[in-house]
Image (tube, rainbow, N blue to C red):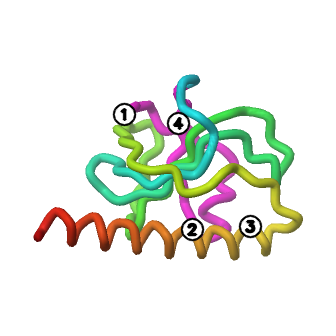
Amino acid sequence: MKFSGIVKKYSGRGKKLGFPTANIEAPKSLEDGLYVGWTDGKPSLIFVGVNETFNETDRRAEVYILDFDQDLYEKQIQVEILKKIREVRKFDSKGALIEQMKQDEEVAREFFKRYNQRNID
């Protein structure tokens, strides 16, 4: 599935946690979860849903582009979903969330390593 949107500014929490995200509206047809995919051709983790850990109520896509550190506010981005890697969870603490995010990043890096090898061979 592909979708696009204009990056909106939220709390900036992702950046403070070490995982800066580009936040856009999530398509209603896309199931909540954490996905790997491409954002403007760059490997990414894409969270779709409501961030219950911080008692938020609005549903959106939070896109973490691996090895990328540029300001995307008010810019249009194109996201392509490749694979769901886990369900949305509420975490007991900020520390527990950060630990899971680190594990998710490892899963994503391994996915793209295999993906790239498959496409080179």
Which part of the image, by quadrant, shows the C terminus?
bottom left
Against 65, is 23 above or below?
above
Ranked by sequence position, the earlier of labels 4 and 1 is: 1
The residue positioned 82% from the left and 52% from the top of the image is 54
Among the 4 quarters of the image, the one containing residue 91: bottom right
Ranked by sequence position, the earlier of labels 1 and 2 is: 1
Tag in front: 4 or 1: 1
User: Which residue lies under the disc numbered 4?
Assistant: 24
Query: Which one is in front, 25 or 102?
Result: 102
The residue positioned 31% from the left and 56% from the top of the image is 42
Tell me, for residue 104, which label it has, or none.
2
Name the spot of residue 60 as percent of width and height, x first: 62, 36
Question: Does 57 lie within the magenta span?
Answer: no
Numbered range of the magenta stretch: 1-27
Tag in front: 4 or 2: 2
User: Which residue lies under the disc numbered 1?
Assistant: 2
- Amino acid marked by disc 2: Asp
The answer to whether the residue labelled 1 contacts the one labelled 2, judged by CB atoms less than 8 Å apart, is: no
Side (left or right) of 40 relative to 19 = left
Side (left or right) of 66 relative to 114 = right
- Amino acid marked by disc 3: Leu
Q: How crowded is mark 2: few (under 14 residues within 10 Å), some or many (20 or more)?
A: some
Query: Which one is in front, 23 or 87?
Result: 87
Q: Check disc 2 and report its element: helix, strand or loop.
A: helix
